[in-house]
Image (cartoon, rainbow, N blue to C red):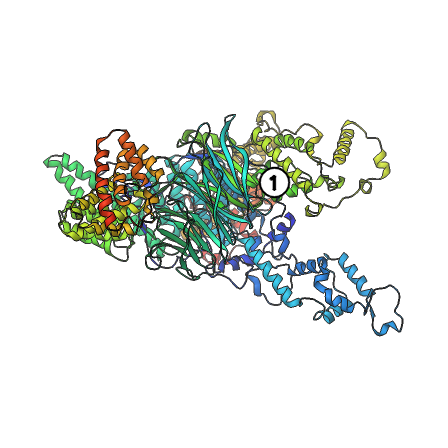
Amino acid sequence: MDSFVEQLKRGTEEEFTEESAWDGSVVNTTSSSLPAIYLPLLPRYLRHPTTRGRKATEFQETKKACLNYIQDALLQHQWQRAAEFMTNYLETLENTSAEKRMAAPEVIWRIGTEILCHHSKSSIEEFNYFAERMKNLGVKRYLKVCLEHVFHLLCNGLIDDAYQNLSLAEGWRYGEQTAAQDKELKLIQAYKGLLDYYNWDKKRKAMLELDGNFADSVEQEMHSFFRQAAVNLKEIIKIPGVWDPFVKCYVDLLEFYEDYDEVRQVLSEYAYNSKFPPNPNAHVYYYQFLKRQGESKKTLMSVLKILHEIVPSHELMLEYNAMLQKSKKRKNHRLGLEIIFTLLDFAGWKEHVKAWSCLAKQIKQILENSSKHLDWVTEEWNSRKDWWPAFHFSHYLAKRNWQENESLACEKALVAGILLGKDCKYFKYVSHQGCKAKKEKFRTMKKFVKKHSSTHLRASGVLDSCTPL
Amino acid sequence: MEFPGSLFPAFCSAGPPRDPPGPGPAPLAGWGGYGHVQGPGPSQPQERFIPLHSKKGESWAPAEACAVPFLPPNASCRVPTLTPHDILYVGHIQRKHQVGKTGGAALDFTGQLAHFFLDHPEEAFGAMGRLLQENFYLGEARLRSKARENAISVKTLVQELGRREGRRHCPQARPSPRLRWFSCLSRDWLFEVPLGPLAECIHEELALQWAKLLFDDASTGGALAWLPTEDLAPAPRGCLVHPGGEAMNLLCFQEVALEQVGGALQPRAHGRPAQFELSGRIRQVAAAQVAGEALVGVRSDHHCGAWRLRAGAAPVPLQVIRTDAPASCLTVSPHLPGELSVCTLSGAVYLWNVETGLQRLRQDPETAFFREASPWRWSEFTAHPRVLSCADRTGLQCLDVRAPASRQFDLFKVGGEAECQRGERVMLPMYLGRAHPCQHLVATQFSVYVLDERFPLVPVLRWEHMLEAPPVFAHLTPGRSQETSHKVLLGAHRTQELLLLQYSGGSHSACQLAGPPRRLHPISQGLQHLPPQVTPWQDLLHQRLTAPAAGVTAAPAGQGPLEPLLVFQLSDAGDLFYQTLLHEPPAESESSAAPTSPPSLPAPAAASQPSPAWGASLGSGSEESVRLPGTVSEGTAEAGQAAAPEEARPSVGPTAPSPAAAARYRCWLKALIRDWSRLPEQSQPQAPPTISHQRLFTHGELSQPAGDGLYRQARQLLRRTMRERGCLAPWALGPPPTPPAMPHPVEPGAWPDDLSKRLTASWAGGWGEWWEEKLGVTRAHKLHALRDRRRRLKQARSRRSLSGSFTSSITYQSDLSDFSACSQPPSEPPGQAREEQQPPAPVCRQDLSPPRAGRGDLPPAPGQFWPASPLASSSQRSAQEAWGSQDTQDSSQLLSSQTLSSRGIPKERRKTLRDYLAICTQPCPEPPAELPASQASSLGSQHWGPSSQSQRSTASQPRRKRPRMGF
């Protein structure tokens, strides 16, 4: 078997090059000797089991083996061992195969960075030295390496060094840029803007502390930082993407200078432009800005309404619900009920006391207000009655909730009692336990449930169809 | 359930996947980068920036050197897994046109046909054979005239066939004309099934098998599940659900307790497993625990079943469904008891409630986002119990069970939003609900993505996993608290790879990769630690341990956040293995990793050698075990050498496994061999050919009395091993050989001779200095040099003026140095070689420009690297210092004969040159460092005039330079 594999492994070099031209996205259905999925790392002897062709040179084989050793050491977190192999792997920069020679700098950069990040004896100076060398190992990678170098400096708290590197990289030009390089340059500018913002923030704090004379010069510096930051941040925010940190900083800058129209425009663009991905944070930022501005409830609610459509499980929905409850329109009350029901559909809200107490309060209100809007509850309940009992009101959950969070159990029991009747297991268990503990609120709750569940919901046909657990 | 207040920045462009620079991802693309960073928010106090791919995280490491068997081997499994050897044709195929060049696999369907004809002649030729029986004469004698009317003699034909059978594997064998003639004549009518269609069918089937061998998605999801029991006293317990039996059709529920045995965590099976025999091979076992009870879903090709498991009770089968198209997925709802989702290869997605039955949500043979031939479908539950995610190879969509047609949204798409690459396909989606209710994991053959349902299409985390084979198994161990990370195990099918990833965040903070990933031991790692066995056993062992993986799961040993983690692995042969993962405190991790690393590069072959100490103990164990009847003979002793090395993945072999693990392996091996020898004869693999020792030795040699002790001992041992039909291991001759100790460091003072001194000097980097000193110190040499110097001073003067005339032009000089720069390999950037202590390629560079004082740009001469490369462990800093000190010695070093010869200067002229240079360097000291490079170089060039001239005569110099020399 092994000799067989050996024989197969002598794949042809010529065919490898052809292979690289093979389009991976085209699924080859006619030639069934290939797998249906493009598997680039499939051993070549499996893809080209022919005995023709010449062997790879010993140099290639050694370097391949060396790379495997490095990868193995990295995956087992043996950084010293990887570093030792690395010294031997560097020869691959002289690889005779053009394709491998082109790929070599990136591989070396990646492995070297990883080793230097983890090696116990590496220092930031060494890292800087390595990064500087790597930057010059190919024009195509310059910006990428710069950016990653800056990230490393930032993560180690060397913000000034990072700023210097960003300024250098920002001015870098080489021929025509590829799309990827364009993006990297944009990112470099954006991160520089971010650091400018932090500098600005520092100056602002300093200015607040200083008195008149010095404040002027500080203010001058602050303004110059503002200009630099604003230009760069504004630039990146225009491009479709996720720019939460940048947007936050830009908004903070503008708000300081009271350019509220620009903020409004930027945030609404970030939230509502269809080219941007549906980022919930964009809506949150816009909402928070409007709230800070003291906008009307109506405007705020319209923002939250859109957020509700995108992310019905967002935590701002509780706030939205509270707003709707406060409004005078009956339609909004209805919507509020719907929102709180939807919120509790999600597994993440299952044990949220506030959400449950909201629901309990609202149902209670409806029942107490002469049950005029009982059909709202009925309607919401109808779409959930086949799975809410098992999802929320099982006997197991009653036990667990009672043990872990009594108030949650209490709120849920109230809802369960009203929706499922006083015979439901959840209500029975909790009220029994509550009465045993001799707590007043359970007695009132029991009374309330007994009063309402039997008369109102049964009358409206809610409980007839549901099976008591 | 909060949404992170600020996500990491990312570009996001809708559209098709971006073009990769080459086919597939860049190698090792998962290392190195931080991805993105984000700083503290506007109102927060100054903190550090946090990266997307954090380099710091919990450090977990396997406690053993290999995965250890958990249960006895699956006794009844005897069907070997398919190998390329079985279905591929090896050898030259004459192709007129290179049609199938992209898919170069040549399937050996003719071989399969031949097997069929030989094994089942009645089915292949029955009817025609009976018809022709009267007309074919098989006898030896000649046919009489009367009989010749209706019968022909096929004696010669049969003889030729027999002869041909004997030369079956001879590449030069050509069919005789008679056979060709007969085959042409009979091809159309001889076969029961027409040959063409039969061959086509066989080829089709082989192609199918081949595609499956390359990538098989049937076992996606894995057939292993761990269900912890809630009560933890005295030891954490649980139930391991796994398939077993002859065809992996036996569903086993094994009660397991995780016990501390001698400081190590060990799983211990309690009682007999509850077993259910199913009618098909179990492909996937899915399980979830809802409301205090566990639901186990089992998928085989056309049947899916559900079992309920309550603590302290036997598992109860609930329901079985049958699907027309093979099922490709079965998942159990983590929200509602008794709910499962099923997908079939016909593109249908069902919600299966064990009480109410099946509800079809979708039936669409087309893929969701773009056309893709694979019929594979998958479905998972989401944060909303009424919303299911449906996946095909192109992406994930979520659909509402209450209105499946109208309410749906896209969760993930192979495209620009997720920065996918061309050819990337979804391999395995998984709902990460236990870590965060809104998170999903999507694994492709290149990367893993973590998605948040609340922000669809744009992954919150993306990382290239660098696995060889696409991951088809995944297991999540959620972090217990905010601080601890969630651990994801990714497993591959064919290569048995297993990777541990950690990530954190999702609600308060954005998702982050926590620390570098870690590879866990594949099952086949055990092979390296086992002693060599006799060939059939070795083959069996190899076959069992390298069988593809079939599932992976993990069990935390306790409630604490950093309790050990037990990882169970299942192989396709039905064998169960486990390994323990221990948390390493951060400070210790480096120091504990360092000693295990060998100081020098281990040869790949050495890595596959079994560790002697353990090998011996295992070897003695297997000697006691059941002997194999009649399969092993004397001749095979040498064949049972070391286990076949896994070339693709070099192993590290931290250390040998602990004695407890070794004992477990020994028992397992014993049981494996015992079970195997009990199998009926025909199902055992073919025994290797045996030869009698009488063919190797003459009778006289055998009866000769053995000479001295060692020979006699060896012979006795050989005889005993042959009698026992065992394997003669090399170390059986004596005590296990100790690994060669590190040689003592050489004491230079102890070696006073010239050569040793020179070697010492060159090792330390002072070769040139030593040489100079040697030249200077020897009095005779000195005198000789002096005489020579005087004699040549006159000649030199005239030459110097000459050389001065043609190198005085600065432009020429710069041209020269340009030329020398061009002659360097283009990809080598200036200074790169220095920084990394790289020994340069041994090319003889036509270094025309003379050495300059400020050698900033020029890579050092070959000799310079010697001090650095053998002592590779010395730090970069020291190497740099070494280089720095070397700079001053350059000119003297050039005098060494080796350097000169490398410069193409003939032997007889070296002496002259050396002496001449000695003159030049002595009167005028080396150019001061303050001199600008151009000046220094021009200065140097004056001294070097003759040498460059002499070079020009030997090494063909471009002639176009001449006119610019001023002549």
Question: Horizontal and vertical percent for residue A23?
Answer: 47, 60
Q: Nearer the viewer, residue A386 or B693?
A: A386
B956 lies above or below B923? below
Q: Which amino acid does label 1 sit on?
A: Ala
Q: Is residue A55 visible?
A: yes
For the N terminus of chain B, the quadrant is top left
Q: Is residue B930 visible?
A: no
* For residue B598, side relative to residue A161 (left or right): right
Label 1: how many residues lie within 10 Å, few (<14), some (14-19) or many (20+)?
Answer: few
Question: Horizontal and vertical percent for residue B112?
Answer: 66, 58
Residue under label 1, please give it. B605
Say what secondary structure mark 1 lies in: helix
Image quadrant assignment for residue B842: top right
Chain of the residue under label 1: B
* For residue A386, side relative to residue B284 (left or right): left
Question: Horizontal and vertical percent for residue B202?
Answer: 62, 61
Q: Which of B608 and A58 is in front in this view?
A: B608
